[in-house]
Amino acid sequence: MQIGQGHAKITEMKNPNQAVSAASVLTIVGAGSLNWGRHIAVDMMLNPDLAGAEIRLVDLNEQRLAMVHEWCEFARRRLGCGHRISAHTDLKEGLRGATACLTAISVGGDRLWRYDSTHPQLDGIFQAVGDTTGPGGAIRALRHAPVMRGIAQTLAEVGAPDALLLQLTNPLNVLTACIDGIPGIRVYGFCHGYHDTEHIIAQALGLIPLHTAHDSVWRQNTPLVRVELAGNNHFVFADKLQIGDRIYTQSEIRELTPQIFDGPFREAVWSRYGVYVGNCARHPIEFLPGFNDRKNDFGRLWGVAPVAGEIDPLHGERHDDSQTLLEAALSDARRDFSATESWNLHHSREPIAEILAAFQTGKRLDVHLNLRNEGAIQGVADDRHLEMYCRIENGEVIRPSVRFPDGITAEIARVGQSQLLLARCCDQFDEDLLIESMNLDALMPKEEAVVRRLMREMIDFQRDLIFPAN
């Protein structure tokens, strides 16, 4: 039996005859990313179940969008695909008739991410990432929510009936929750954290060398490594783990310890809660009390830096030569189309195209999604937006039932409650609701006056993005 089989159904299938539409329109909002958007477009082209689909690229940055569009057209020709690819700076035109939409946006970019993460240090709050929980995650949610609601409402207005919105922007659970109630669309979130976890385990067990690049290639000559995780986004725990032909349940994972610990943090969580925590350690360490505080040198004692390297001012500016490389590739292709033979037009490690195809064809796909709990994680309220292993089948989502030890279930429930309150605040701002959410956060100080003053400071710094003029 393979991992992912033999689970009880929590959500019943509603449309067993749902099939792919011959006129699928797939829109990528945030396609101006010079790396991510174009490779997801290639994944769509390579998926036979999405043959004939129209791919629309949407972004506000006209220059970057044009570059990505041209690159995708060259890629389409090289692959011999018949997809129609178009570029749009107008959101409504990009979403008109869309059957599915991906949202991968960054309001304020790295500059505001750096502010979100480092400003709270003035109050002794250090965030290893600062994009999902803590004050950084909260402000990021408030900043992205107006744009996210605009995308979702526009899709509901002009997209195809029951259009799918696959939400990829952090903080994932909060932003997915704040648009999930918009009628006329289906909303799910996706994060590749479970792939990260499989990669970490493969390295820890010596199945692949340390520092092996995290892409799809490492799996080709490696015994099967698969996990089933559940919890909050970036704060997930293993329910099942498969190595080769052997499947380990929660209680049996103990047989793999301590080999599967890649550092002191993961071992400490196992010792405290009796579960294996997923994702790169810098994410879950922000959620648990007693790890990322002054006593523990703000995470350094657990092998985790107190601020993300990508935005750490002490590391200098990020060196990103993506635009230079893309411009050179396009220049070569314009002169001689055969230059595209050297382009990497293989499938990325993201299963996004497969998720879209599964929803539209009715085929089965095992994957992790962000969605309402609805009884899946026992002991956590149904309305909490969580991350969990799911099975997409016949166009619907089937959730397995998961039970964790009481200690970690309480932590998942606490984080879920905090994120639900924040999602409501994103929908209609209420300072008291925001403070109530923050008081549940493990990173925040106990003095409510400090919490309230800090959140006011951070909101004032980017008020024009959090409360945009109508």
Image (cartoon, rainbow, N blue to C red):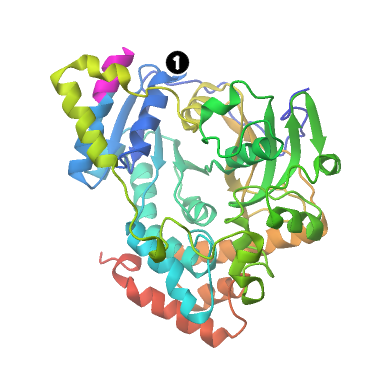
- Residue in front for this viewpoint, 155 or 111: 111
Residue 412, image x, y percentages: 69, 58
Residue 146 placement, left or right of 203: left
Specify whether residue 92 is in view.
yes
**Residue under the point 40% across and 65% down:** 314
Please determine whether, in this image, residue 44 is positioned above or below residue 236: above
Magenta region: which residues?
73-81
**Residue under the point 69% across and 36% down:** 227
Please determine whether, in this image, residue 167 is positioned above or below residue 408: above
Specify whether residue 416 is in view.
no
Residue 467, image x, y percentages: 33, 68
The C terminus, quarter of image: bottom left
Q: Amino acid at mark 1?
A: Pro
Picture quarter containing residue 285? bottom right
Residue 180, image x, y percentages: 50, 50
Residue 207 placement, left or right of 133: right
